[in-house]
Image (cartoon, rainbow, N blue to C red):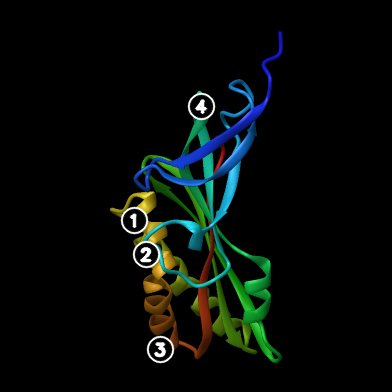
């Protein structure tokens, strides 16, 4: 017999069980669902607009569902605002292990029109930086760093020595597989 659907309050485990929203369903179809929440809606987090955090619902009891932090996404609108006339967008994607799970860290670098040899140098340096970024950090620490903008500033300074960059941004941190 089917269970009746009802509204469940979603609580983020990593953020001291802060309530991040609600979801409609029942005890059998709520687990393993992925929801996205605006990063500004979480308590004690100050960030630029456009970032969303992905939470995986892992369990449900009575009227509450527990969610675990899984990903970070920068909205397409924010990325579109960064790319201006006479500039190129370089996408840098690296696979890395965080908490013994495979994640992809996707970064964009906005540079003025450049020859391919400079783009190769910029990509290589960005790859090295991203590899070092995820070492010795868990997912929550890494995402909170990205939300504050600290790694983006470090990468911008590092790449500025090779070729003038207009902007750098971590576009996405997502879990690969299940």
Mark nearer the N terminus (3 vs 2): 2
Residue 141 shows which numbered tag? 1
Within 10 angstroms of label 4, few (less than 14), some, or many (20 or more) residues? Answer: some
CA separation in Å, label 1 and label 4: 26 Å
Q: Would you say the residues marked 2 and 1 are in contact, meaning their CB atoms lie under 8 Å apart?
A: yes
On screen, residue 171 versus residue 96, left or right, reads: right
Quarter in which the C terminus is drawn: top right
- Badge 1 density bin: few <14, some 14–19, many ≥20, Cα 10 Å: few
Where is residue 74? Give x, y as percent. Answer: 58, 64
Mark whose residue sits in front, 1 or 4: 4
Observer-side mark, 1 or 3, equals 1
Disc number at residue 36? none
Residue 159 vs residue 147, the one in the foreground: 147
- The residue labelled by disc 4 is 60
Which residue appears at 34% of the width and 56% of the height? Answer: 141
Q: Secondary structure at mark 2?
A: helix
Cα–Cα span, label 2 and label 1: 6 Å
């Amino acid at each position: 017999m089917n269970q009746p659907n009802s509204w469940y309050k979603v609580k983020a485990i990593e953020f001291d069980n802060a309530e991040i929203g609600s979801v409609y369903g029942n005890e059998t179809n709520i687990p393993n669902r992925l929801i996205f929440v605006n990063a500004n809606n979480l308590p004690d987090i100050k960030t630029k607009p456009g970032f969303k955090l992905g939470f995986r619902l892992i369990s449900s009891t009575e009227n509450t569902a527990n969610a675990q932090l899984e990903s970070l996404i920068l909205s397409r609108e924010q990325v579109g605002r960064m790319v201006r006339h006479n500039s190129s967008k370089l996408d840098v994607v690296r696979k890395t292990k965080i908490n013994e799970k495979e994640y992809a860290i996707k970064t964009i670098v906005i540079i003025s029109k450049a020859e391919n040899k400079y783009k190769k140098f910029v990509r290589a340096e960005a790859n090295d930086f991203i590899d070092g970024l995820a070492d010795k950090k868990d997912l929550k620490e890494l995402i909170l760093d990205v939300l504050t903008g600290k790694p983006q500033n470090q990468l911008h300074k590092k790449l500025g020595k090779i070729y003038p960059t207009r902007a750098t941004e971590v576009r996405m941190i997502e879990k690969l597989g299940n």
